[in-house]
Image: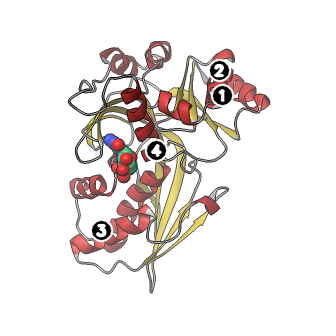
């Protein structure tokens, strides 16, 4: 017997970063949108806890105990008194280390799949609590849709969305380390004499206009609010200056907005409609400023069992 869970990637339509907290995290106002690029995690009982990965970028994914899916299985088993020995297989389509929370998505999927396999009786709320322990971005893929993340991103409030938004993602060569991008953000703030702690930087706030554009399903209004909505973008560009060219290419091809996705290096482009998304994708592919391109849409639902 096995259980398969399908889980979406995300884009941050706003990522307001506050000061560095004493616990090493930053306070955030993080507006998540789940998009239709999915991984699938399949769990099967086994005589040891082991991980396999398939898909074009499988070789970039660790298959030892450091993989978040192993940590998820262990944590759920420990809290609910079960045997953690399962084979976890990840069918990977979400870019690795791309700022689309692929590792967090797999972790969320592993929680849902192990719960379905073991029948521990954990509620959705229990899973959310475990998810927040495993990582700041792990709770959102349990929920999907759109949500505002406060705290270090784990305190979620679902958001209304009035329609489907069309997106193009441009994958870069290689990844970027999330902690390194946050450190660069702090360094740039220090360099400007702003300081980088919670005492120096105002508490991050969601943009009311951006939330309203999401609620109305209005891509033009959302596009107008996305410019400069990602406080990690400057840091990602500082570590990877070539991304500026990718962003420019998509904008010139008619994207309503161009931004670095989360901590990068994937770049995200909001398009008016599916046709415009295809135009942006073609221009990006022709430009040689990225490794590969995906056209997709959001919001989509969160982690869900699809087979077993
Ligand atoms: O929560 P997670 O383990 O995914 O975070 C990875 C790293 O990203 C943290 O160790 C920290 O360096 C950085 N981070 C942060 N503030 C957040 C979320 C993550 O500084 N709100």
Circle 3 sits on which residue? 75
Q: Position of residue 143 (x, y in %)?
A: 34, 45
Mark 1 or mark 4: name the one nearer the start of the chain.
Answer: 4
Residue lying at 65% horizontally and 23% vertically, measured from the top left: 250
Disc number lying in front (1 or 3): 1
Q: Provide the secondary structure element on which disc 1 rests.
A: helix
Q: Is residue 137 left or right of residue 203?
A: right
Mark 3 or mark 2: name the one nearer the start of the chain.
Answer: 3
Residue lying at 22% horizontally and 53% vertically, measured from the top left: 125
* The one of 217 and 27 positioned closer to us in this rendering: 27
In whole angstroms, how far apart are the C-alphas of marks 1 and 3? Answer: 40 Å
Q: Is residue 179 left or right of residue 169?
A: left
Q: Are marks 2 and 1 in contact (CB under 8 Å)?
A: yes
Q: Residues within 10 Å of mark 1 (few under 14, many from 20)?
A: many
Q: Are marks 4 and 2 in contact (CB under 8 Å)?
A: no
Mark 3 or mark 4: name the one nearer the start of the chain.
Answer: 3
Q: Quadrant of the N terminus?
A: bottom left
Q: Provide the secondary structure element on which disc 3 rests.
A: helix
| Ligand 1 under 8 Å from disc 2 Cβ | no
Mark 4 or mark 2: name the one nearer the start of the chain.
Answer: 4
Query: Could you tell me if residue 211 is visible in this image?
Result: yes
Q: Are marks 3 and 4 in contact (CB under 8 Å)?
A: no
Disc assigned to residue 248: 2
Disc assigned to residue 246: 1
In whole angstroms, how far apart are the C-alphas of marks 2 and 1? Answer: 5 Å
Q: Provide the secondary structure element on which disc 4 rests.
A: helix
In whole angstroms, how far apart are the C-alphas of marks 4 and 2? Answer: 24 Å
* The one of 144 and 177 positioned closer to us in this rendering: 177
Circle 4 sits on which residue? 180
Residue lying at 71% horizontally and 41% vertically, measured from the top left: 291
Residue lying at 65% horizontally and 31% vertically, measured from the top left: 242
């Amino acid at each position: 017997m096995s259980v398969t869970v399908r889980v979406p990637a995300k884009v941050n339509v706003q990522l307001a970063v506050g000061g560095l907290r004493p616990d090493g995290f930053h306070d955030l106002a993080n507006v998540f949108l789940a998009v239709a690029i999915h991984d699938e995690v399949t769990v099967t009982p086994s005589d040891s806890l082991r991980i396999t990965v398939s898909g074009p970028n499988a070789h970039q994914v660790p298959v030892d105990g450091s993989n978040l899916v192993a940590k998820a299985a262990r944590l759920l088993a420990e809290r609910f008194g079960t045997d953690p020995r399962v084979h976890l297989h990840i069918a990977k389509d979400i870019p690795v280390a791309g700022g689309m929370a692929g590792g967090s998505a797999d972790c969320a999927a592993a929680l849902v799949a192990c719960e379905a396999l073991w029948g521990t009786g954990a509620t959705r709320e229990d899973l959310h609590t475990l998810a927040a322990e495993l990582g700041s971005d792990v709770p959102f893929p349990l929920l999907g849709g759109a949500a505002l993340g406060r705290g270090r991103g784990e305190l979620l409030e679902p958001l209304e969305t009035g329609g489907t938004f069309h997106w193009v993602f441009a994958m870069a060569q290689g990844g970027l380390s999330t902690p390194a991008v946050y450190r660069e953000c702090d360094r740039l703030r220090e360099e400007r004499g702003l300081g980088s702690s919670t005492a120096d930087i105002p508490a991050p706030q969601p943009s009311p206009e951006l939330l309203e554009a999401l609620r109305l399903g209005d891509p033009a209004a959302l596009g107008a609010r996305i410019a400069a909505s990602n406080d990690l973008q400057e840091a990602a560009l500082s570590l990877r200056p070539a991304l500026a060219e990718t962003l420019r290419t998509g904008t010139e091809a008619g994207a309503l907005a161009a931004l670095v996705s989360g901590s990068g290096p994937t770049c995200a482009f909001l398009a008016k409609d599916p046709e415009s998304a295809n135009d942006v994708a073609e221009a990006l592919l022709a430009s040689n400023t990225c490794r590969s391109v995906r056209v997709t849409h959001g919001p989509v639902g969160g982690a869900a069992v699809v087979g077993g």
